[in-house]
Amino acid sequence: MSNNADNIIINRAETTKIDSVDFENLTFGNIFTDHMLICDYKQGVWEKPIIKPYEPFLIDPSAKVFHYGQAIFEGMKAYKDDHDDVWLFRPDENYKRFNKSAARLAMPEVPEDVFIEGMKKLIEIDEKWVKTGMGNSLYIRPFMIATGPGVIAAPAQFYRFMIILSPAKSYYSGEVKVIIAEHYSRAANGGIGAAKAAGNYSAQFYPTKLANDLGFQQIIWTDDATHTKLEEAGTMNVFFRINDTLYTAPTSERILDGVTRKSLLDIAKRENINVEVRPVLVEELIKAAENGTLQEIFGSGTAAVVNPIVGFSYQDKYYELPKQENSVALQLKQKLNDIQYKIAEDTFGWTVKI
Ligand code: COI
């Protein structure tokens, strides 16, 4: 791969917005830092990346991103430790997944130095936006869109890779209740469910809105063919604790290979928590809820981190989960955060210094 990031063009903002931001009361994904990274791909060649002030840009109305949704993204976070050092969490995993998504959407692979070194340089420039303290992070959104013009339904010749940064606290504010999908589907075998494609998320907006109208925050998607297997919650992978065992579905063509999910599985194994990665049936969840063995359900994701679910609805019946004194979800979250914020030793080698 070329070494495009060796000479990133840097055009610094003359002013900063940072003083106008209320870092204690952030709503997820609404505020962006002073700079962004852009790298354009034109007819087979990646140009030099540019870091410049965050601002809107011009794009042809016929660009394929608008008409055919040729767009992918990643979600990552940077954390500041008590020595003011800033750390990325498993960026190589996001980089690999990004290029897998690119291949699935017939988009070009982004060179590693543009993605990783470009990201590090951008964060270094906006380093003041990463706040110390558990719960504070900088959400990183790398994405790629097809900028090539023309409404013929074929992959574009021109693309734009970008990284934008957003200071973040929690994704969900308040309790999360879910509905188990009985009709709509998130993904199907052979489709793009395993890719972080923009369309996977917009396709969920309508059924999620229906769920929101009924007082639920999310949907737990089931397999499209039979609606009998529990899969993921769209913004999160899902875990179920029945008695003392944690269950989560194996990743597949329909389920995103979540970085937080796989990290929690490794931590759980290290902590000697029983874990089974296997299809989890709706039927067994209902049975466990009815016989009192279902202890916890929680979601995992970069934005959501580890989010306990307080109850779920299926076939119009609501099942409330028992209150937990010392939930496994929160224990795992603590262990994960301790690694991310460099409070505990990172024995897995997951953290990368900026
Ligand atoms: C993330 O957790 O980073 C995601 O990409 C989910 C997104 C819908 C916020």
Image (tube, rainbow, N blue to C red):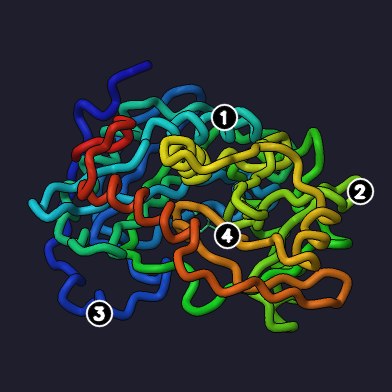
Q: Earlier in the sequence, mark 3 or mark 4?
A: 3
Q: CA distance from mark 1 to mark 4?
A: 27 Å
Of residues 298 and 145, the one nearer the viewer is 298
Residue indicated by mark 4 = 298
CB under 8 Å between discs 3 and 4: no
Residue type at mark 3 is Asp
Q: Is residue 177 left or right of residue 143?
A: right
What label does residue 22 carry, if any?
A: 3
Q: Secondary structure at mark 2?
A: loop
The crowding category of the residue bearing disc 3, from other C-alpha atoms within 10 Å (few below 14, some 14 to 19, many at least 20), is few
Q: Position of residue 257 (x, y in %)?
A: 58, 38
Q: CA distance from mark 2 to mark 1?
A: 27 Å
User: Which quadrant holds residue 256?
Assistant: top right
Q: Is residue 312 above or below residue 226?
A: below
Residue indicated by mark 2 = 226
Q: Position of residue 298 (x, y in %)?
A: 57, 59
CB under 8 Å between discs 1 and 4: no
Residue type at mark 1 is Lys
Q: CA distance from mark 3 to mark 2?
A: 47 Å
User: Which quadrant holds residue 95?
Assistant: top left
Question: Which mark lies nearer to you, 1 or 4?
Answer: 4
Number of marks in the rendered image: 4
Residue indicated by mark 1 = 100
Q: Is residue 158 left or right of residue 139?
A: right
Q: Secondary structure at mark 3?
A: loop
Q: Earlier in the sequence, mark 3 or mark 2?
A: 3
Q: CA distance from mark 3 to mark 4?
A: 29 Å
Of residues 314 and 42, the one nearer the viewer is 314
